[in-house]
Image (tube, rainbow, N blue to C red):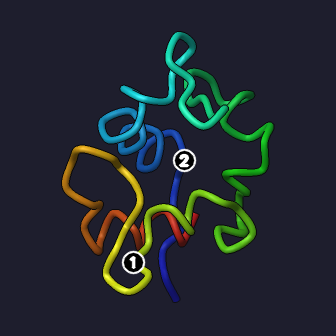
């Protein structure tokens, strides 16, 4: 059994480090903002306990070797993707 992933301790810092530059209150690329938990969860891009049900997982996972996000940066590594998909 895999350990439960804690959003505040494991996911939020990852998203802050890798995504907040383009998805914040001032720069809300794709109408998706991570500046607060309320905005991050409001558009169903991040669905707690159902990563496959949210759009975020589609953007960060490889399809034919082409991850869409983050733009202008290296793709998330396998462990980062696994962590988000377990959340």
* Vertical order, 63 against 82 (above or below): below
Q: Which residue lies furthest to the left in this view?
A: 74
SS category of the residue bearing label 2? helix
Which dot, 1 or 2, sits closer to the camera?
Answer: 1
Q: Which of 4 and 65 is in front in this view?
A: 65
Horizontal and vertical percent position of residue 57: 55, 66
In front: 28, or 6?
Answer: 28
- Dot 1, how many residues are within 10 Å of its Cα: few (below 14), some (14-19), or many (20+)? some
Q: Which of 2 and 62 is in front in this view?
A: 62
Q: Do the residues labelled 1 and 2 touch (CB within 8 Å)?
A: no
User: Is 72 located above or below residue 39 in the figure?
Assistant: below
Where is residue 55 drawn, in percent x and y?
Answer: 66, 60
Q: Where is residue 40 in the image (x, y as percent from the top left)?
A: 66, 36
User: Would residue 42 be found to the left or right of residue 81 on screen?
Assistant: right
Rendered position, 54 above or below 33: below
State left or right for residue 64 relative to residue 48: left
Q: Which residue lies at the image location 39% right of the left edge and 54% below the top edge? A: 69
* Mark-to-mark CA distance, 1 and 2: 22 Å
Q: Position of residue 43 (x, y in %)?
A: 78, 42
Q: How crowded is mark 2: few (under 14 residues within 10 Å), some or many (20 or more)?
A: some
Instruction: Say whether disc 1 or disc 2 marks the residue closer to the N-terminus.
Output: 2
Question: Which quadrant would residue 82 be assigned to in this image?
Answer: bottom left
Q: Which mark is residue 7?
A: 2
Hey, which quadrant is residue 13 in on the image?
top left
| Residue at 69%, 51% in the rendered image | 45
Q: Residue sitting at 42 percent across and 29 percent down?
A: 22
- SS class of the residue under badge 1? loop
Q: Which residue is label 1 attached to?
A: 62
- Seen at 66% across and 32% down, the residue is 31
Q: What number is the disc on residue 23?
A: none
Quarter of the image with the C terminus is bottom right
């Amino acid at each position: 059994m895999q350990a439960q992933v804690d959003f505040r301790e494991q996911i939020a810092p990852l998203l802050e480090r890798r995504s907040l530059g383009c998805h914040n209150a001032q720069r809300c690329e794709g109408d998706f903002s991570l500046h607060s938990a309320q905005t991050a969860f409001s558009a169903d891009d991040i669905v707690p306990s159902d990563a496959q049900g949210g759009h975020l997982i589609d953007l960060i996972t490889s399809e034919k070797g082409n991850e869409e996000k983050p733009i202008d940066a290296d793709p998330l590594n396998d462990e980062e993707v696994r962590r988000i998909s377990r959340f």
